[in-house]
Amino acid sequence: MVVYFCSANRLKVGFSASKKVGNSVVRHRSVRLMREAMRPLLSRVNPRSNLIVVAKPDLPKQHLLYITLDLENTLKKAGLVL
C-alpha cells in the first residue's frame, strides 16, 4: 500500500486501485479491504489531513489483519497517527 497525504481543514480519506491490481471485482474487493483496515485507525489519524490510499497488486491476496497492520505502520512512519 502507498499513502499520499497533505494537510487540510478536516480529515478526508480516499481509496484507489488501478487495473494492475486485477479486474473490477478484485479492485473493488481491494478498496473494501482498505476501507475496513482504515476503520479502526480513523479515530487516531490526524484530523487535519487528506489521505489517498493506493492498493498494490498483491493486496487482495492478504488477510485483513495484515492489511490493517501494514496501513498502521505506514501511517506511523508518516507521522499521521496520534
Image (spheres, rainbow, N blue to C red):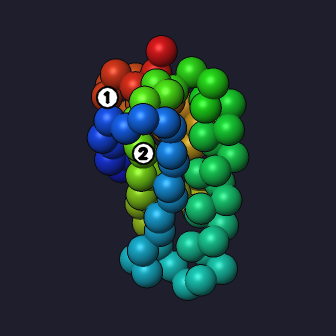
Q: Are marks 1 and 2 in contact (CB under 8 Å)?
A: no
Q: Is residue 10 left or right of residue 3?
A: right
Rendered location of residue 53, percent (x, y): 44, 52
Q: Amino acid at mark 1?
A: Ala
Amino acid, disc 2: Leu
Q: Is residue 31 above or below residue 41?
A: below
**From this viewpoint, is residue 15 visible?**
yes
State the image coordinates of residue 13 (x, y, percent, origin top left). Answer: 51, 48
- Structural distance between the alpha carbons of marks 1 and 2: 11 Å
Residue 15 in the image: state x and y as whole percent.
51, 58
- For label 1, count other residues whose C-alpha is less than 10 Å away and answer few (under 14), some (14-19) or many (20+): few
At a point 55% along the width and 32% down the height, the residue shown is 69
Q: Taking 64 as reference, is 76 above or below it?
A: above
**Figure label count:** 2
State which quadrant residue 19 falls in.
bottom left
6 vs 41, nearest the viewer: 6
* In front of the other: 82 or 56: 82
Q: Eyeballing the image, is 19 above or below 4?
A: below
Mark 1 = which residue? Answer: 78
Mark 2: secondary structure? strand
Asked whether, in this view, residue 82 is left or right of residue 6, the answer is right
Residue located farthest toward the top when viewing the structure as drawn: 82
Query: Which residue is identified by label 2?
Result: 51
Q: Residue at x 47, y 68 (%)?
A: 17
| Closer to the eye: label 1 or 2 | 2
User: In percent of the image, x 63 and y 24: which residue is there?
Assistant: 43
In the figure, is residue 44 to the left or right of 54? right
Measured from the top left, where is residue 21 in percent x and y?
46, 72
Secondary-structure class at tag 1 = helix
- Tell me, yes or no, if residue 58 can be seen here: no
Q: Which comes before the other along the chain, label 1 or label 2?
A: 2
